[in-house]
Amino acid sequence: MINRIRDIRKQKGMTLSDVAVNCDPPTTAQTIGRLETGMRNLSLVWMNRIGAALGVDPQLLVKADNDGAPRAVARLGAQGAEALARPTDAVLPIELLGDEKLMALLVDVGAGEYRADDQVWLREVGPDDYARALNRDVLAPRPAGRFAFGRMIDQRDGRIALLPPGPGQRQVVIDQPAWLGVAEMLVRRL
C-alpha cells in the first residue's frame, strides 16, 4: 500500500509540524515525515490520528499501488492553465464517486468566477461527447503537455473554441483534442 499523507497535507496547505500538532495526542514532525515516506508503518491507530488531524476520512490516506486515483493534472494561473511539474493525487469529494475518469484543476490565481485555492473537479469525456460540453467550462490538452481552460463556445470539424475566464481574454482554438475534462464540481474553502 502507498499512503497519500503528503499529497493530502500539501493540498490542505499544512506543514509536517501542523499535522503533528493537530494529532491527538500531539506528536513530532519527524514522526509524521517517517509515516509519509513509509520509513515507519502506517498502523490503523496512526491512520485515525492523522486522518483526524488532516480533517479527512482515514481511508483516504492509503491507496493500492495500481488504483486509478484521480489526479490533479493542471493549475490555473495568471498565464492560463499550466501542467503540474508532477501530477499529484487529488482528494476526491464523496459526491463524485463513480467509474468515470476524474481529475482536478487547482486554481492558483483568481480568474473570472474562480478564486485562488479553488479546486475544479472535471470528468473526462471523449470526442463523441464534446457536443454535451458546449457552454460548460472545460480543460483541454494541447501539444507539448500544455492545457487550455475556459468556456467551450464552439465545436465543429474536430475543433473546439474556448473562452478563458476573466475579462478581455481571447478565444483559444484547439484542433482535435484527445479528450476534454468537463467541470463537474467547484470545491472552495470557506
Image: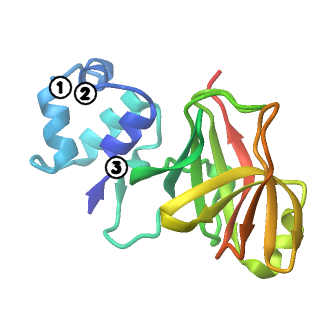
Residue 169 coordinates in the image, percent (x, y):
78, 39
Q: Residue at x 59, y 38 (%)?
A: 79
Is the residue under label 2 in contact with that under label 3 (CB below 8 Å)? Answer: no
Q: Which residue is mark 1?
A: 29
- Against 156, residue 39 (above or below) is above
Is the residue under label 1 in contact with that under label 2 (CB below 8 Å)? Answer: yes
Residue 138 coordinates in the image, percent (x, y):
74, 56
Q: Residues within 10 Å of mark 1 (few under 14, many from 20)?
A: some
Residue 180 coordinates in the image, percent (x, y):
69, 66
Which tag, 3 or 2, sits closer to the chain's start? 3
Which tag, 3 or 1, sits closer to the chain's start? 3
- Against 74, residue 181 (above or below) is below
- Against 130, residue 84 (above or below) is above
Q: Residue at x 18, y 23 (%)?
A: 27
Please indicate whether residue 114 sits to the left or right of residue 158 in the image.
left
The amino acid type found where label 3 is placed reads Arg
Q: Quadrant of the N terminus?
A: bottom left
Please indicate whether residue 156 sits to the left or right of residue 150 in the image.
right
Q: Residue at x 50, y 55 (%)?
A: 73
Q: Which residue is mark 3?
A: 4
